[in-house]
Amino acid sequence: MAKTVLTFGPQHVVFPEPIQFKLKVEDEFVVGAEPVIGYVHRGIEKAFELNELKKNIFLAERICGICQTPHSNAYVLGVERLMGIEAPPRAKYIRVIMNEMNRLHSHMLWFGLLGDAIGFESYFMQVWNYREKLMDIIEKIAGNRVTYSMNAIGGVRRDISDEQAKEIHNVMDFLEEAFKSIEDVLKDYTLIKRTKGIGVLTESEAKRDGAVGPTARASNVPYDMRMLGYDAYRDLEFKPVVVDSCDSYGRAVVRWKEMLQSINLIREALSKMPVGDIITKSNALPKGETVIRVEPPRGELFYYLKGNGTKNLERVKVRTPTFANIWPTITMLSKGCEFANVPVVVLSIDPCISCTER
Amino acid sequence: MPGMISLILKNLFSKPVTRKYPFEKRPPFKTARGHITFARMEDCVFCGMCMRNCPANAIKVDKATRTNTLEPFRCIQCAMCVEVCPKKVIDVLPEYSKPEYEKTTLKFVQEKKEEAKEKKEETKAEKEGGKA
Amino acid sequence: MENDINVTKENLLQEVQKFRDKEARFVIATCVDLGDKLEIIYHFDDNLKLINLRLQFAPDEEIPSIASIYPSAALIEGEIVDFFDAKIAGIGHGTLLAPDSPKAPLRKKKEVK
C-alpha cells in the first residue's frame, strides 16, 4: 500500500500555538506520527539562574499565558520549603481561590475552542461572553486580567475584602445558571457524533505513556495532585473526577464536571477563610534540593529547585503537563484515525505549546 | 423547531453584547494596575531601592543630577517599586497607557536645593528653641 | 531528598524494569551540572509517592537510554542531549534547539580570571 507523509502545522487554523506533526497517511487513515517541537523556545531555565530570588516570581508567571497562577504558586512553595518558612492560613485560602478561578476561566476557554474546531462558531462566542464576567471580577481583585501577580515569597500581596467576596458569590451564581446551556450542548446529536469514539486511549496505554490531567482521568486513571493537600486543599472536601469512556467525549465531560466542582470549592473556601496576616517575612537564604507538584487545569506541573545558600538558585527544572501528554497523542493518532478528525484529537488534550518549550 | 423560533425572536429584539469602542469607553476599575508614575518627587532620597527591585530594569536613579528616569515601554506594571519605596514616592494608577509611534523615556526631576536648605534651617531653629 | 536510590550505568536498565513491572509512572528526568560530573535524576511516581534514581557520570561517557522500556522518555533525553551535550545511546541532537544555536547552553562555564 502506498504511504504518504503529510505535515500538519506549524500554522493551522485550529491551534493557537505552533507545533508540527508529520503524519504517515495510507488512503485516508493515519498510521504513524512524529512530533517536531522547538518553534517558541525562549531559554527560560537559563534565565532562572541569572536573576535574583524575588524577580523570578514574575518570570515563572510568564511561562504560560493561560495557567500563570499555578506556575508562580509552585515556585513560591519550593522557595518557602528551602528557606524553612510557611505562609499564614489566610494566605493559603486566598491562593486556593485564585487557583480555582484560574481553572474555571481555562476550561471555559477550552469549551470555546472545541466549538470552533467542530464548526459551532456561535457556541464559541456565547461561552466566551460568559467568561467576561469572570475576567472582570479577577481584574478587580488582582489588578490585571491575565498576569495576576498575587503570590509573594511567604504569602500573597493583596487581600480579598468583604465587598469583593460578595461579588464573587454573585458571579458564581450567574455562572452556575449559565452552565446549564453547556450541559444541553453536551447532549446534542452533532457533538456526540464528532467526539464519541474518536481518539481512544485505553487504561493500560494511559499508564504506560504517562498521561496526566483530564486526559488520564477520562481513561479511568485517578491522578490529581490536589490529593497531596498543598496550600488549603487538605481542609476542603475534594475527590477527583473520573470517567471511564476513554475518548474525546469523556474528556469534555470531565472538564464540565470539574467546572461545577470548582464553583463549590470557591464557595466553601470563602466561608471557611480565617482572619489574620497575609504574609510571613524572612531573610533566610535557600539551601538544598526539593520537588514540588501542583495541579493546573491541564494536568500535573513539576518543579525541581536546587539552592546553594546564595541569592541566586543553582538549577530550576520545569516539566509542564502538555510535555507529558505528547506521547499519548502519538499513540491515539497512530491507531487509524481519519484525517479529518486529527484536529479534534489534538485539541482534546488541551495543548499549551509555550508551556512545553519554555 | 419551536425552540428555534423563540431563540430567533429573542436574538432579533435584544441589544448586542459588544460596546461601540472608540465612542463608548468603559471606565477603569479602581484597583487595576495601569501605569506607574513618580508622584511625590520632593520626598525622594535617591536610595535606589526601586532600581534594584525592578524585574525589567526600567528605572534609573541618578543622585548627582537628582533625576529619576522611567522607561514605560519596559515596565511590566508589577508594582514592586510601589511596595519597596521607603518614602512612598511612587503611585500606580488605573488607566492603561496609550500606544505610541516611538519608544519614549520619562524623566522626573527633584526641585531646587535652596528650598530644601531653607526647610533644614527652619527645623534646626525649632529644635534649638525646644532644647533651650 | 527522601526516597533516593543510587544506580550505576550498568544496573540502570534493571532498576527501571522493576518500576515497569510495578506499573509506576515515569514523571521526568532532571540533569544537573555538578562541575566535573553530570548527574541525571530519574523521577518515578508510584501511587502519589515520588521515588528518585540518581546516576552520576563523566561528561564524555556514554550511558544507555531507557526509551526501550518507557517510550515516552525519548523527548526528555533529546532535551538533555541538546542542553548539556551528554552522550545517550541512540539519541541525536536537534530536538529543541536549532542547528545554529549556542552549544550546550546550560553547562556552567569555567571563569577565566
Image (cartoon, grey):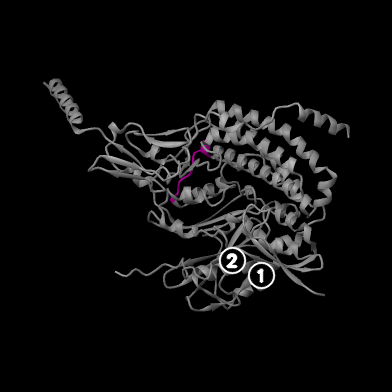
In the image, what residue occupies the spot 38% across and 35% down?
Answer: B37
Mark 1 residue crowding within 10 angstroms, few (<14) / some (14–19) / many (20+): few
Query: For the point 61% across and 48% down, which residue is it?
Result: A296
Choose between A287 and C79: the one closer to the eye.
C79
What is the crowding at mark 2: few (fewer than 14 residues within 10 Å), some, or many (at least 20)? Answer: some
Q: Which part of the image, by quadrant, shows the C terminus of chain A? A: bottom right
Front one among C98 and A238 = C98
**Which is more N-terminal, label 2 or label 1?**
1
Residue named by callout 1: C18
Give how far across and how far down residue A302 sits, in percent. 57, 55
Residue A86 is inside the magenta segment: yes
Tell me if residue A39 can be seen: yes
Q: Which residue is painted at 76% across and 49% down in the image?
A: A118
Using the rendered view, name the quadrant where residue A200 is placed.
Answer: bottom right
Could you say which disc has been placed on residue C76 in the image? 2
Asked if residue A35 lies in the magenta stretch, the reply is no
Chain for numbered disc 1: C
Asked if residue C54 shows in the view, the reply is: no
In the rendered structure, which amino acid carries the disc numbered 2? Ile
* Residue B18 percent location from the top left of the image: 65, 33
Under mark 1, the amino acid is: Lys
Find out whether the residues at labels 1 and 2 contact each other: C-beta distance under 8 Å.
no
Give the x, y percent position of residue A343.
Answer: 73, 56
